[in-house]
């Protein structure tokens, strides 16, 4: 298909989500807007922010992005080269004086939280805006609380697809920089268009974004195949002590801080390990539990078919999708990892197919 042909087809496409009007009304109402996403930002969250930044600039809005963490190294390729574009990173502001200097940037802005089902998942950034008094919305594609602040549509495969549809509803063209970011988010959150929520609309969005000569192979490699050489040694360390229950179809890796010593693994050492274990025949639920620098626990849960790992994540204050969820618990790793493993086993026993 030649560039422009997908545009000709999309003239017959009408966005269906009722939530698009609510998001559009929020953006049109407020002049000064803050974009943020969940801590431990990922391709979908970053891609959605970039897409929205360009859209809001077209709408002549004063927009800033403030995230808890720096963009992971493997995602830096998707960042715009636009000299006006910047992501302010809370964790770069080391002391109280610097954090105080950050507050005026956030003050008196309407807040749009993207790809996050809870304000607290924005990490320390959440301390900068008063959710009790500020105008704010959460734009997401996960299951969200019944609350007018949460504008979520689970029919979307990714928040980037949601943002793409917002462009369609507003009849705004997408720039090449925004297209690169949005396409990268689609690739990541659909598992390169393999996961169950990949729909006709998902492929329409991807086709539209590919009106530009995006480096699709390079994007895939950045997201899924950009690990350091020491990754092989790391996998050997953690997989030999992984908990595996063939009867229940469970594989769980528990990663202590000591497992990372002496290895060069980049900024996202555990990325993709749960999916790697889930790729084994007979495994229906895979989990990676990681001890944080402060000795607490964060975990990624993945599953196949009707196994709903979101139910498990919710027990520990986390969330996400039916087949892909995450959580972070501010308790000691040793204690919570045992509790989480018990919950995974209990769920697998109860729901064994």
Image (cartoon, rainbow, N blue to C red):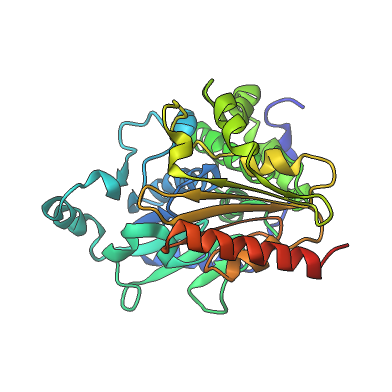
Decide if residue 262 is on the left or right side of residue 279.
Answer: left
User: Residue 190's quadrant in the figure?
Assistant: top right
| Image-based side of 100 in relation to 209, left or right | left
**Residue 88 position within the rendered picture, expressed as x and y whole percent measured from the top left:** 29, 45
Question: Farthest right residue?
Answer: 353
31 relative position to 97: left or right: right
Residue sitting at 45 percent across and 27 percent down? 263
**Toward the viewer: 324 or 277?**
277
In percent of width and height, residue 305 lies at: 81, 55
Residue toward you, 163 or 243: 243
Question: Where in the figure is residue 301, as x and y percent of width and height?
Answer: 64, 54
- Residue at point 44%, 36% (across, down): 72
Residue at left offset 27%, top offset 63%: 128
Residue projecting furthest to the top: 229
Q: How many marks?
A: 0
Q: Report the quarter where the N terminus lies.
A: top right
Give the residue at x 42% y 27%. Answer: 262
Q: Position of residue 273 (x, y in %)?
A: 62, 39
Q: Is residue 333 above or below residue 4?
A: below
Farthest-out residue, front: 241
Q: Quadrant of the C terminus?
A: bottom right
The front one of 53 and 310 is 310
Q: Is residue 337 visible to the viewer in this orientation of the structure?
A: yes
The answer to whether residue 226 of the structure is visible from this angle is no
Q: Is residue 351 left or right of residue 48?
A: right
């Amino acid at each position: 298909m030649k560039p422009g042909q997908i545009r000709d087809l999309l003239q017959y496409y009408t966005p269906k989500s009722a939530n698009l009007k609510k998001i559009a009304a929020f953006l049109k109402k407020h002049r000064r807007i803050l974009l943020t996403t969940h801590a431990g930002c990922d391709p979908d969250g970053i891609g959605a922010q970039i897409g929205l930044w360009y859209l809001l600039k077209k709408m002549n809005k004063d927009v800033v992005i403030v995230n808890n963490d720096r963009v992971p190294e493997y995602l830096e390729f998707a960042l715009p080269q636009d000299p006006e574009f910047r992501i302010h990173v809370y964790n770069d502001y080391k002391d109280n004086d610097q954090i105080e200097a950050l507050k005026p940037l956030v003050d008196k802005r309407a807040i749009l939280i993207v790809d996050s089902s809870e304000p607290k998942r924005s990490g320390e950034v959440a301390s900068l805006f008063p959710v009790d008094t500020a105008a704010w919305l959460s734009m997401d594609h996960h299951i969200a609380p019944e609350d007018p602040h949460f504008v979520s549509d689970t029919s979307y495969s990714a928040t980037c697809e949601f943002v793409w549809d917002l462009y369609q509803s507003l009849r705004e063209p997408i720039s090449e920089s925004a297209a690169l970011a949005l396409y990268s988010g689609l690739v990541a959150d659909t598992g390169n268009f393999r996961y169950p929520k990949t729909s006709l609309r998902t492929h329409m969005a991807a086709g539209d974004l590919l009106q530009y000569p995006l480096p699709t192979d390079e994007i895939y490699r950045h997201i899924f195949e950009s690990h350091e050489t020491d990754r092989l040694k790391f996998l050997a360390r953690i997989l030999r002590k992984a908990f595996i229950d063939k009867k229940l179809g469970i594989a769980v890796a528990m990663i202590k801080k000591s497992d990372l010593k002496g290895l060069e693994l980049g900024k996202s050492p555990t990325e993709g390990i749960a999916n790697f274990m889930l790729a084994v025949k007979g495994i229906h639920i895979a989990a990676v539990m990681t001890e944080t620098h402060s000795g607490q626990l964060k975990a990624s849960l993945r599953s196949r078919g009707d196994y709903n790992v979101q139910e498990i994540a919710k027990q520990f204050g986390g969330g996400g999708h039916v087949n892909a969820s995450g959580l972070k618990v501010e308790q000691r790793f040793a204690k919570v990892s045992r509790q989480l493993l018990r919950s995974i086993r209990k769920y697998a026993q109860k729901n064994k197919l």
